[in-house]
Image: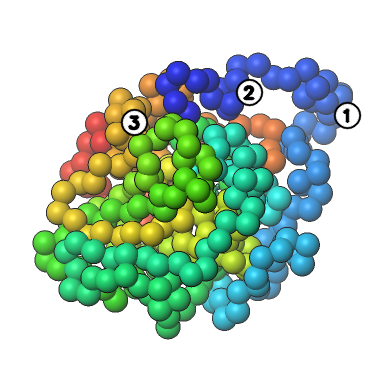
Amino acid sequence: MLLRHRRSWDLQERDTTPEALWASRRSFLRGGAALLGGASLMPSLSATAATGPAGGGLADPGPAAGGTPLAGVTPRPDLAAADPLTPWDAVTTYNNFYEFGTAKEDPARRAKGFVTEPWTVTVDGDVARPGSYDLGRLLMGIGLEERIYRMRCVEGWSMVIPWVGVPLAEVLKRVEPTADAKYVRFETLNDPKRMPGQAWRVLDWPYVEGLRLDEAMHPLTLLATGVYGRSLPPQNGAPLRLVVPWKYGFKSVKSIVRISLVREMPRTSWAAQAPQEYGFYANVNPQVDHPRWSQAKERRIGDFLRRDTLMFNGYAESVAGLYSGLDLRKWY
Ligand SMILES: Nc1nc2c(c(=O)[nH]1)N[C@H]1C(S)=C(S)[C@@H](COP(=O)(O)O)O[C@H]1N2
Ligand SMILES: [Mo]
């Protein structure tokens, strides 16, 4: 997510390819290996690339990764993208989490030591069971699942990430939305002492995101508590973050402290910051360009060649029905 007045890292990369990369690409092509397809830009990362869960087991980056291994996680091979996983190293060091700084490498460095225990989630608005819940209590008894989802950032890059989490629908059923609830509003922690990036007013903190209630109840919508079989590292949104795989990454709000059931479409951070650039729906759509760049293609982290972006990020079969009657060009 780049602000109007600054130039995107990815746009720069797209516009000017660093000397070294051209050099290595030329030698790569000379080697006649071009027919093999995407060459890796990141040898150190691809050297440790996971190839996906073996035999239906959980993806595991190995003990060097740190974090707490999560027990009792059910793999969902039916909800696992077939694409090779983005390596743990990339998933946990190339992040957007402006509360910890705006450079991709800032969150991994500056969120180190971010304390997520205890963690309270306030549920309010049009629900039968409002309250401030300890996170463990809110999720208690809901089975953890591993789901491998593609993630497409609006900036034009993508990853394939093995999340661990619970269906948001299960949590919402527990708190019982009333008939008046039409949208769900999510809020990230607002605490500049613990989130140093909040000293800069790049966004109107706290970070707010939202979904229509039917999107929130959709079986693909996940509340993640882990990644790669381990508890979420802080830079990925510990201890609780949303994952909505058919929408641009900015919808997947991190470090959630409040979930509100509301009647009106919430005023979300990026749509408020730059309404001409970011919409509320933010469904991945290769046919609707961002005002400053095309969304037709994306760079899968670790690949050399760019690939086509898929409608609804490849989840059209499951989610297109949510938007019948909605003009996808207007409500991008
Ligand atoms: N609170 C908060 N949530 C956020 C962001 C952020 O800056 N703050 N960035 C978003 C963007 S733009 C993306 S692409 C994803 C990145 O998630 P990841 O770092 O776990 O890959 O988080 C999203 N959630
Ligand atoms: Mo993003």
Residue underneath mark 2: 13
Disc 2 beta carbon < 8 A from ligand 2? no
Looking at marks 3 and 1 on the same chain, the residue that comes earlier in the sequence is marked by 1
Give the camera-side residue of 271 and 150: 271
Residue at 64% across, 53% down? 112
Residue underneath mark 3: 273
Cα distance in 3D space between marks 1 and 2: 24 Å
Label 2 element class: helix
Which amino acid type is shown beneath numbered disc 2?
Answer: Glu
User: Decide: marks 3, 1 in contact (CB < 8 A)?
Assistant: no
Label 1 element class: loop
Q: Nearer the viewer, mark 1 or mark 2?
A: 2
Question: In the displayed structure, does residue 322 sit left or right of residue 148?
Answer: left
User: Decide: marks 2, 3 in contact (CB < 8 A)?
Assistant: no
Vertical order, 19 against 298 (above or below)? above
Question: In the displayed structure, does residue 89 sit left or right of residue 8?
Answer: right
Q: Is residue 160 visible?
A: no
Residue underneath mark 1: 31
